Image (spheres, rainbow, N blue to C red):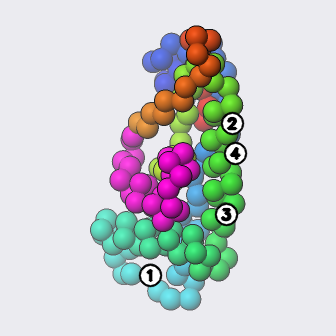
Amino acid sequence: MVGLQTGMGLTAVAPQVHLGLNKFDFDGLLKARYRKTPPPGDLMSNLKSHFRSLGATVLAKQRDEIDSSPESWAAFTARVEAARQFLTKDRSGPILAVSLGGAISQIINATLGAAPTQQISRQLQMKNCAVTRFFIPCAPFFCKASIRPCI
């Protein structure tokens, strides 16, 4: 975060941490999904198999079909929504938020009002390093030029 702040000239701004932007526990979710049946043999060695399994696992999680999941889909979406509300409550200027694909794609999904099943499609389109920009209008003529980083 320090590198981002320095690069953007924000060293005087104290970052705020919001747990709603944390990723979901995919390793724990896979263990829960494959608790009773063996996972595909190439799950961790073949990217195509890995991401196909990721998609199917998240969709099963959304339907509450995975027993002992580390976090329910409802809990995940609720905490990400809390982060989205936190990020948009102060519209005094640009906000830098750093997160991972699952939380970012859920924020995009909620903002667009898209079906829950579209979240994983968005997540699988994200790269390990991606920039997502939202433009949320603030009160006309009263926007201040400040940036509040949030991680």
Q: Is residue 92 above or below residue 81?
A: above
- Left or right: 67 with respect to 119? right
Indicate which disc residue 74 carries.
3
Towards the viewer: 13 or 89: 89
Q: Identify which residue is drawn at 67% across, 26% down.
A: 90
Looking at the image, is mark 1 or mark 4 earlier in the sequence? 1
Towards the viewer: 25 or 86: 86
Residue 125 magenta-drawn?
yes
Indicate which disc residue 82 carries.
4
Magenta range:
108-130
Q: Amino acid at mark 4?
A: Ala
- Left or right: 67 with respect to 134? right
Between the residue at mark 1 and the residue at mark 4, the CA separation in whole angstroms equals: 33 Å
Residue 81, position as x, y percentages in the image: 65, 48
Element at badge 2? helix
- Tell me the residue that label 2 is attached to: 86
Residue 103, position as x, y percentages in the image: 55, 50
Point out the image quarter for the C terminus. Answer: top right
Between the residue at mark 2 and the residue at mark 1, the CA separation in whole angstroms equals: 38 Å
